[in-house]
Structure formats: C-alpha cells, structure tokens
Image (spheres, rainbow, N blue to C red):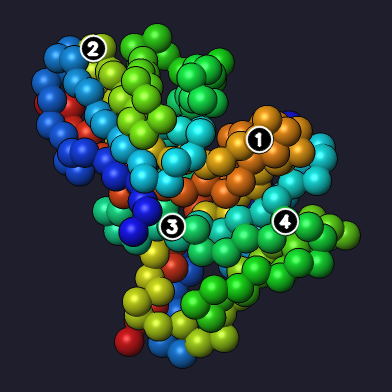
Amino acid sequence: GDSVTQMEGPVTLSEEAFLTINCTYTATGYPSLFWYVQYPGEGLQLLLKATKADDKGSNKGFEATYRKETTSFHLEKGSVQVSDSAVYFCALSELDTGRRALTFGSGTRLQVQP
Amino acid sequence: DAMVIQNPRYQVTQFGKPVTLSCSQTLNHNVMYWYQQKSSQAPKLLFHYYDKDFNNEADTPDNFQSRRPNTSFCFLDIRSPGLGDAAMYLCATSRSSGTSTDTQYFGPGTRLTVL
C-alpha cells in the first residue's frame, strides 16, 4: 500500500536558517504530492503541491520538487521565520486510481527561535 | 471567501453522551471527508461522501456515523463517546470527477473533549 515517511522532529532552527524537511514515499501508481502545514490549535492548510515528476511546488518561500527517481518530495525554505513554527505534513494522493484519501506522513514539528 | 467551516471549534461532552459535529463548505465541492487527529499524530480518515455516496474506512468504529443532507453540509455523529475519542476532528472537501480528485481543503477542526 501507499506510505509516506518524514524525518522525525522536532526540528529546531534559529531565525533566518535554511530549512529542509525530508519526505519519501511509496506508491503503486503516479501520485500527486502535497505539503500541508498545521499551526497550533488549527486545521491543515495546503502549503504546496506537485502533480507530476520534476514539478516544483512553491508558496510563501517554501519549495519542494517531485523527484520520481528518488521517490522524494523534500520541503525547503531558504530563511525561516519564527512565524513558520508549526507541524508540517507530507502527503500523497493517487488521483488516477480514484482513491480519494490522502496518505499522510507522521508530521514534523518545526520550532524557529528568534 | 470560499471556505470550509466547522462548528463548534471546541466541544466538550460526557462519556457516553451523543455528540454531533458539523461542517459546511462554500466551495461547492462534491466530496467531503472526516478525519480524526489525535495528539501528535497524522490525521486518520474516518469516512467520506462522494456526492451522496457514503464510503466508510474499514477500521472506522461503528460508534462513528455521518450524514450529508445536501452538498454544503456534512455531520459527524459519535453515538457513545469514549475517552479514547477525544481528538481533533477535521473536515475536508475536494472536487472529484470519478477518476481524478483535486486537492483537499481542510476546515479549522473541532477539538472534542470527553469527560
């Protein structure tokens, strides 16, 4: 079955540091890949997505590239801010198969210190 | 703004007392989902509606039911809440054409406390 593996947190960085959160996946078909962000006490917000190999999703300074050869979708940001402190979930959906559920990774908590 | 709305944001109930959580959407999406998220865990899909068709996950307890009276609204009913049902409940929506499904958009969640 499908699965998503994320690096364990918490990840603690100083403001303006470079961020990488690793995400790898296994899937039977050709999934779309997503990063969702969850701020404390809130629901999930779509951060970015990519629907095919070599696509780069980007939003709010965050980027992730769909790498089919390494089955990865690592999240990066060049300079993090305190306001980026949240839990980040990598997820996949095999849209072509009609299975509509998202398969989530376990989440990575990011703490950015001033 | 088009959005997914959940009410209430916080719900406290007593052990065994039925509770209903509500979700509404202005996105006109045909698919609505309910997820359960326990502390420090990933969301877990309970069930979803594809139009009027109800799709239950195999491991969702019978204690959890859902209703979708129209396109815009979906309810989660917990018939006899146990202490283990305390969690954040997330509603999400997407547009699906049958063989493809668009991005899921989530509401802010309802945090359920069981006393």
Disc number for residue B80: 2
Residue B32: x, y in percent? 46, 33
Residue at the (31%, 35%) spot, across then down: B23
Quadrant (top left/top right/bottom left/bottom right) for the N terminus of chain A: top right
* Dots 2, 4 in contact, CB < 8 A: no
Query: Could you classify mark 3 by the number of other residues whose Cα lies within 10 Å: few (under 14), some (14-19), or many (20 or more)?
Result: some
Residue at the (82%, 60%) spot, across then down: A53
Q: Which residue is tagged 4?
A: A51
Q: Which residue is tagged 1?
A: B97
Question: Amino acid type of disc 2?
Answer: Ser
Q: Which residue is tagged 3?
A: A45
What element does badge 4 sit on?
A: loop
Q: Is residue A105 visible?
A: no
Query: Could you classify mark 4 by the number of other residues whose Cα lies within 10 Å: few (under 14), some (14-19), or many (20 or more)?
Result: some
Q: Chain of mark 4?
A: A
What element does badge 2 sit on?
A: loop
Residue at the (54%, 26%) spot, across then down: B50
- Which is nearer the eye, B101 or B39? B101
Query: Could you classify mark 2 by the number of other residues whose Cα lies within 10 Å: few (under 14), some (14-19), or many (20 or more)?
Result: some
What element does badge 3 sit on?
A: strand
Residue B82: x, y in percent? 24, 18
Tell me the CA gap for discs 2 and 1: 35 Å
